[in-house]
Image (tube, grey):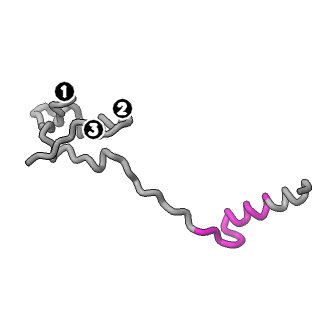
Amino acid sequence: MDEFSKKQLARNLSIQAAGLGAKLPPIEKKKETTLSKEIDCRKCVHFFVTWEKNCPYGCKSYGFKGPQIPSIVVKSSSGESCKFFKQRV
C-alpha cells in the first residue's frame, strides 16, 4: 500500500469515527463486575456498626473500622474481593 492510500484510509476512518460518514456499530458496554457491589457487608456476620462518628462501619474478620463499607475498603486496598464474607442467617 502506497503512502497516499494509507493517508486516504486513515482519513476515511477518522471521518467515520467522527460520525460524518457511515455510522459505526455501537460499542457494547461491558457489564461491571465489581465484586464490592456483589458483596453486601450489611448481610455479613462479621459486619458491625460503631457509635463513632468518623468510623461508623467495621469488620470483625479484618479487624478494622472506617468511614466506608468494609468491602469497598478491602477492594480498593488489595484489589481483591472480601475473602471472609459469610451470610447472616
The residues colored magenta run 10-25
In the structure shown, which secondary structural element does the residue marked by tag 3 occupy?
loop
| Residue 21 coordinates in the image, percent (x, y) | 72, 71
Structural crowding at the residue carrying mark 2, measured as other residues with C-alpha within 10 Å and reported as few (<14), some (14–19) or many (≥20): few
Q: Where is residue 2 shown, x and y percent of the image?
A: 91, 56
The disc at residue 48 is none
Relative depth, front residue between 40 and 12: 40
Q: Residue at 74% of width from left, 62% of height from top? A: 13
Q: Please tell me in which quadrant of the rendered image residue 59 appears.
A: top left
Indicate whether 13 appears above or below 85: below
Which comes sooner in the sequence, label 1 or label 3?
Answer: 1
**Circle 1 residues within 10 Å: few <14, some 14–19, many ≥20:** few
Residue kind at label 2, given as amino acid type = Ser
Distance of label 1 from label 3 (alpha carbons): 13 Å
* Residue 78 numbered tag: 2
Q: For the residue labelled by badge 1, is the local secondary structure a helix, a strand or a loop?
A: loop
Q: Nearer the viewer, mark 1 or mark 3?
A: 3
What amino acid is labelled 3 in the image? Answer: Cys
Q: Which mark is residue 82?
A: 3
Query: Mark 1 — residue?
Result: 63
The extreme top residue here reads 63
| Residue at the image point whose x is 73% and y is 64% from the top | 15
Please provide percent x and percent y for residue 25.
Answer: 60, 69
Q: In which quarter of the image is residue 41?
A: top left
Q: Where is residue 40 in the image (x, y as percent from the top left)?
A: 22, 47
Quadrant for the N terminus in the image: bottom right
Answer with mark 2 or mark 1, whichever residue precedes in sequence.
1
Q: Distance between the residues labelled 2 and 1?
A: 15 Å
